[in-house]
Image: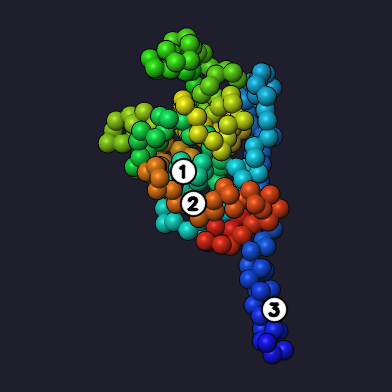
Amino acid sequence: MSSLKVKLAVLAAGLLLSGCMETANYEATNTGAFKQHDKDLLAKVRYENVPVPDAFRRAIVDYHRKEAPGSIVVDSDNHYLYLVQNDGKAIRYGITVGEEAMAWSGIAKVGSMTEWPPWHPTKGEIERLGVPTFVPPGPDNPMGSRALYLYSGGKDTLFRIHGTNQPEYIGQSISSGCIRMTNEDVIDLYNRVKMGTIVVVLEPHHGDSPFTPKMASQNDGTFGTSIGGARVQ
């Protein structure tokens, strides 16, 4: 290979790498801005508040889809929830996907919002998990600190986005529940949305996250990537 070709090859490789080595700036939820009531209840949790894997930490990412700013997009395949921002950006949160979340997909609106909701287990959950018929609000409630209830055509879809008392399952699929977020992240989301917010729930096996968990894990929270148009910042 001629010296000119070698130089061109080295230059091309350098340009390719420079496009993939973007510094990642993950932004943890600002708990200092929480209500005192939230701080008091979160201080009383009895579950182990384990760190979320790097790939599922709250982050600002480039966003390639066309939903309007303020919309929520749920990608259960890749265990991500996006809150669309201006200028081609989105806040991306890691989520746990329960089996109830796989029962509905489509376009809905936030029809109800609750702080520290109670839990009314389904008959199947009561039989399978041995839980009571009613669990009052609080830090150990599986519904967590906030709940968003999705409605379509004026009817409850039974699809919920809520907190959790099992943060160790963020980024995984489990047998019960709907879309779970850490209690801190769901408070952050709750404070950014309003009644009537559009929610797009992607159909299972049709995930559209260009930045996959595998790619995020490979970068180990140190580097972002521009591959596929979803660069973490």
- On the question of residue 187 being in view, the answer is no
Is disc 1 in contact with disc 3, using a CB cutoff of under 8 Å? no
- The residue type indicated by label 2 comes to Ser
**Mark number for residue 209?**
2
- The residue type indicated by label 3 comes to Val
Is disc 2 in contact with disc 1, using a CB cutoff of under 8 Å? yes
User: As drawn, which residue projects farthest toward the front?
Assistant: 1
- Splitting the image into 4 quarters, where does residue 5 fall? bottom right
Q: Residue at x 43, y 30 (%)?
A: 99
SS label for mark 2: loop
CA distance for labels 2 and 1: 9 Å
Give percent across and percent down for residue 150. Answer: 38, 33
In primary-sequence order, the first of circles 2 and 1 is 1
* Residue holding disc 3: 10
Give percent across and percent down for residue 63. Answer: 51, 56
User: As drawn, which residue projects farthest toward the left?
Assistant: 153
- The residue type indicated by label 1 comes to Asp
In primary-sequence order, the first of circles 1 and 3 is 3
- On the question of residue 9 being in view, the answer is yes
Give the vertical position of 142 relative to 106 (above or below): above
Q: Nearer the viewer, residue 151 or 61?
A: 61
Characterize the local packing of mark 1: few (<14), some (14-19) or many (20 or more) Cα atoms within 10 angstroms.
Answer: many
Give percent across and percent down for residue 15. Answer: 65, 74
Q: Residue at x 48, y 40 (%)?
A: 193
